[in-house]
Image (cartoon, rainbow, N blue to C red):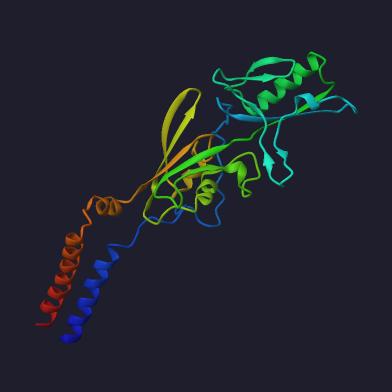
Amino acid sequence: MKIKKIIYLGIAISVMASCSVPKDIVYIQDAPRDEKVAIAEKFVDKIQVDDLLGIYVSSTVLGANVVTFNKSVESTSGGGSSAQGYLVDRNGEINFPYLGLLRVAGMTREQLRDTLEVLLAKNELVPEPRVTVNLQNFRFYTLGATGKMTMQNANNNNMIQGERLTLLQAIALCGDLDITGKRKNVTIIREMDGYREIGTVDLTSKELFESPYYYVAQNDIIYVEPNDRMKRQANLDLTPLTVVTSVLSFATSILTFVYIFFK
């Protein structure tokens, strides 16, 4: 009988301990690891107010003067870089040499590139122009149960070399999510075309790849909600008295189990 009681006691303690094991901490749970999941191109990155644009103009004609137009990241003597570019003002405009004020907010970078190539050629400023436009102050913010609650400037991080940043890459930059963070209900706050929208993403599902929030946009706020256990813990008044009370309560529970099974 004592052996049975020991087994029952072990099962009871295991059940109690399992209640505290974090759930749903694995990313993309519903996709077999040999399955190909298509990425939906639902996100269009548009130029916004306060964007700092690096614009580089070249020409297929040898000896063409293009220096006047070029503003992008320049190397400094200290080995770093100094960001220079065209700042989109509160009216959504940039002041471009010889062309004056151009409204660029709401355009994609590809649309601005094509527009500048047409205008430079039409006004005979650059023969056969070729224009490159990039965003030099791309940033996003992380809040809640993340490894780092801060503003991240992806352009200053060597991990990001391309034109776009995925949500998983952004999470990696902030040091991953805390184990207590809800991965099924990550909130994305986004400003686009003068409107603010709030969306949610489930990081445990392959539907993430079809979400319009799969790619991070300029000034996105990524908020990770803590799980219910952490919320309850945060509501506790952790004074010395409550800590002692919790310890005594746990000890009483163990002693009760021992008494029941070994009396």
Q: In the drawing, does residue 159 fall left or right of residue 210? A: right
Q: Residue at x 29, y 65 (%)?
A: 18
Q: Nearer the viewer, residue 64 or 33?
A: 64
Residue ID at (56%, 26%): 48
Q: Quadrant of residue 21?
A: bottom left
What percent of the width, then of the height, locates residue 29? 45, 54
- Quarter of the image with the N terminus in it: bottom left
Work out which residue is located at the far front of the displayed protein and give it.
Answer: 77
Image: 128 above or below 146: above
Write down the quadrant of residue 114 in the picture: top right
Relative to residue 182, is residue 248 depicted above or below?
below
Q: Where does the C terminus fall, quadrant-wise?
A: bottom left
Q: Is residue 78 left or right of residue 216?
A: right
Residue reaching furthest to the right: 62
Percent of width and height locating residue 167: 51, 44
197 over 4 or under it: above or below: above
Side of 38 where 17 appears, left or right: left
* Camera-nearest residue between 147 and 78: 78
Q: Nearer the viewer, residue 150 or 140?
A: 150
